[in-house]
Image (cartoon, helix red, strand yellow):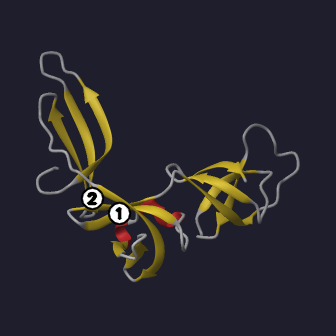
Amino acid sequence: MYGKDPMVVLRTEYSRGGRNSSTVRMKLKSLIANFNTEVVYKADDKLEQVILEKKDCTYSYFAEPMYICMDADFNQYEVEAENMGDSLNYLEDGMELEVVFYDGKAISVEMPTSVVREITWTEPAVKGDTSGKVLKPAKISTGFNVGVPIFVAQGDKVEIDTRTGEYRKRV
């Protein structure tokens, strides 16, 4: 917690001064509102931990401006479009994901660490362009672009790491 807002830590930087006590600089992002901040804490400062609940759900549909997910008991949860983040790059109907709750309100979703998607468009491989690790642009069904090796063709299924957006392997 930072003030009255629950935050998630994006980046930390530890530094130790000569005579001063050590400090930690944190870049924070609000879980509810859409803003970032940077804060410096001393080593002996106490932070309030936020407890988040998670529930396994299935993505159902998009109803402007909410994404609707449903759990096993057919309860529907609405997640605002701006809180979906990078997960929109991989989202498909009927996909399994985790909905994150704070104070009984659905605030975001967590994707599986990797997803399998079909390449809908990519350029053909250029013969002789094989020096080192060569990547070419490819588009998946959601419209997201990912770099793939030159041997991947249109219609192939590939595994993508959802945390980094990078190609893992051909399936």
Question: Which residue is farthest bottom?
Answer: 63
Give the mark count: 2
Q: Residues within 10 Å of mark 2 (few under 14, many from 20)?
A: some
Image quarter (top left, top right, bottom left or bottom right) of the C terminus: bottom right
- For the residue pair 96 and 44, the one nearer the viewer reads as 96
Relative to residue 10, is residue 110 drawn left or right? right
Question: Which residue is farthest front?
Answer: 73
- For the residue pair 57 and 34, the one nearer the viewer reads as 57
Q: Residue at x 16, y 36 (%)?
A: 41
- Amino acid at the residue labelled 1: Ser
- For the residue pair 130 and 34, the one nearer the viewer reads as 34
Residue with the mark numbered 2: 31
Q: Which mark is residue 108?
A: 1
Q: Residue at x 34, y 73 (%)?
A: 77
- Amino acid at the residue labelled 2: Leu
- For the residue pair 6 and 134, the one nearer the viewer reads as 6
Where is residue 15 drawn, in percent x and y? 25, 26
